[in-house]
């Protein structure tokens, strides 16, 4: 028994007319009639009665019809599901993401999926940059979202697509503590507290590069606190200021967080070109590099709609 035979039978049994059934299946009437006759021979019994005026189901045909309809429906649904999967419309994407932006970017990309690809589910893994990089190489995650300074290993593609403005941490008694924003050059001569390069190499490197981009080289000491957010930095007397991101901000009452007018922490997507990527993962990458970045963040050259402007100036199309 062939699927085409069942499909032909269901069409005739539904239309009760060979001509209309042939049009419905986009085939000639002789071909349709032959498919039904072959099915009857294989079943060993007539399924339809035919006269010059009408077509009717036999009792055997009526018994087969409900079962055949279910089979045809299942095959159609399976075909549609396979096509959707091949087009990246369904599936699961395993996303590895660094802790310093996970509270902001993970919900952001999840919301983008809900709006534009609701049948793709997201499996989020919070990972440190070095572990995340290896996870992308090994295929443990499909896509990594990491610090912009992270190096792309062989076989891994990286696109720096967004950046967040650095927040400056100052003691509440600092001369600039009441400002709405701070230019990093105003702090060039004051001791900067930098995260431990042994604990957080990419985060420390990103901050050093941000200082270099601003053209300042302040006296620097390593922070004694071991949490990535450096929440207790005010207890280290030799430190006059620090930098952090919005997702990590949460200093004690002795400190203030003030947006910087200069300097961006950059973030990139990484995925492996050496491994077979699922269509869902490819769709995810395309989507994240296309939709708006979080409010207040800035698009970068890897973003497919980059115009050298902030997200407020790059509006997402309806």
Image (cartoon, helix red, strand yellow):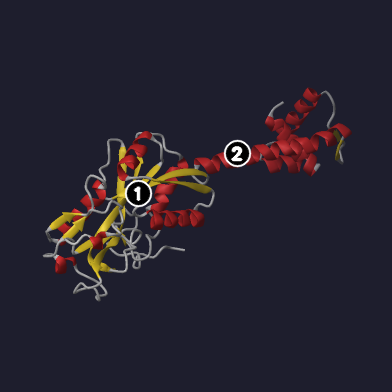
Mark 1 element type: loop
Residue 239 spot, x, y in % from top left: 18, 61
Q: Which residue is mark 2?
A: 79
The residue sitting at 20% across, 64% down in the picture is: 241
Residue 61, quarter of the rendered image: top right
Q: Which residue is mark 1?
A: 98
Residue 56, quarter of the rendered image: top right
Marker count (numbered): 2
The first of marks 1 and 2 along the sequence is 2
Residue 6 spot, x, y in % from top left: 73, 33
Taking the image as shown, residue 95 lies to the left or right of residue 214, namely: right
Residue 109, quarter of the rendered image: bottom left
The residue sitting at 26% across, 51% down in the picture is: 203
Separation of disc 1 and disc 2 at Cα?
38 Å
The residue lying toward the viewer, choosing from 72 and 93, is 93
Taking the image as shown, residue 140 lies to the left or right of residue 229, namely: right
Label 1 crowd (10 A; few <14 / some 14-19 / many >=20): many
Could one spot residue 91 in this view of the protein? yes
Label 2 crowd (10 A; few <14 / some 14-19 / many >=20): few
Q: What label sits on residue 126 in the rendered view?
A: none
Mark 2 element type: helix
The residue sitting at 69% across, 40% down in the picture is: 73
Residue 130 spot, x, y in % from top left: 30, 41
Residue 35 spot, x, y in % from top left: 73, 30
For the N terminus, the image quarter is: top right
Taking the image as shown, residue 268 lies to the left or right of residue 317, namely: left
The residue sitting at 25% across, 48% down in the picture is: 202
Point out the frontmost of discs 1 and 2. 1
Rendered view: 293 above or below 59: below
The residue lying toward the viewer, choosing from 9 and 104, is 104
Taking the image as shown, residue 112 lies to the left or right of residue 251, namely: right
Could one spot residue 29 in this view of the protein? no
């Amino acid at each position: 028994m062939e699927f085409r035979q069942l499909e032909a039978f269901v069409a005739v049994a539904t239309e009760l007319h060979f001509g209309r059934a042939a049009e419905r299946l986009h085939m000639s009437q002789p071909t349709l009639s032959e498919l039904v006759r072959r099915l009857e021979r294989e079943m060993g019994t007539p399924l339809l009665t035919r006269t010059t005026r009408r077509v009717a189901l036999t009792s055997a045909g009526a018994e087969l019809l409900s079962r055949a309809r279910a089979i045809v429906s299942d095959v159609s649904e399976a075909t549609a599901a396979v096509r959707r999967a091949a087009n990246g419309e369904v599936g699961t994407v395993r996303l590895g993401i660094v802790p310093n932006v996970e509270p902001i970017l993970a919900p952001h990309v999840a919301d983008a999926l809900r709006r534009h690809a609701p049948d793709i589910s997201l499996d989020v893994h919070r990972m440190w940059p070095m572990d995340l990089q290896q996870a992308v190489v090994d295929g443990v995650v499909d896509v990594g979202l990491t610090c912009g300074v992270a190096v792309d290993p062989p076989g891994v593609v990286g696109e720096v697509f967004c950046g967040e403005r650095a927040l400056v941490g100052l003691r509440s008694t600092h001369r600039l503590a009441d400002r709405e924003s701070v230019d990093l050059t105003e702090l060039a001569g004051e001791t900067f507290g930098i995260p431990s390069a042994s604990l957080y190499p990419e985060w420390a490197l990103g901050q050093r590069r941000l200082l270099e981009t601003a053209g300042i080289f302040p006296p620097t000491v390593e922070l004694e606190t071991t949490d990535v957010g450096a929440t207790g930095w005010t207890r280290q007397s030799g430190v006059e200021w620090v930098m952090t991101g919005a997702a990590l901000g949460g200093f004690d009452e002795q400190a203030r967080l003030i947006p910087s007018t200069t300097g961006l922490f950059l973030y990139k997507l990484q995925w492996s070109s050496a491994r077979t990527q699922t269509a869902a993962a490819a769709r995810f990458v395309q989507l994240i590099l296309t939709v708006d970045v979080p409010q207040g963040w800035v698009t970068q050259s890897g973003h497919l709609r980059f115009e050298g402007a902030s997200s407020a100036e790059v509006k997402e199309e309806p």
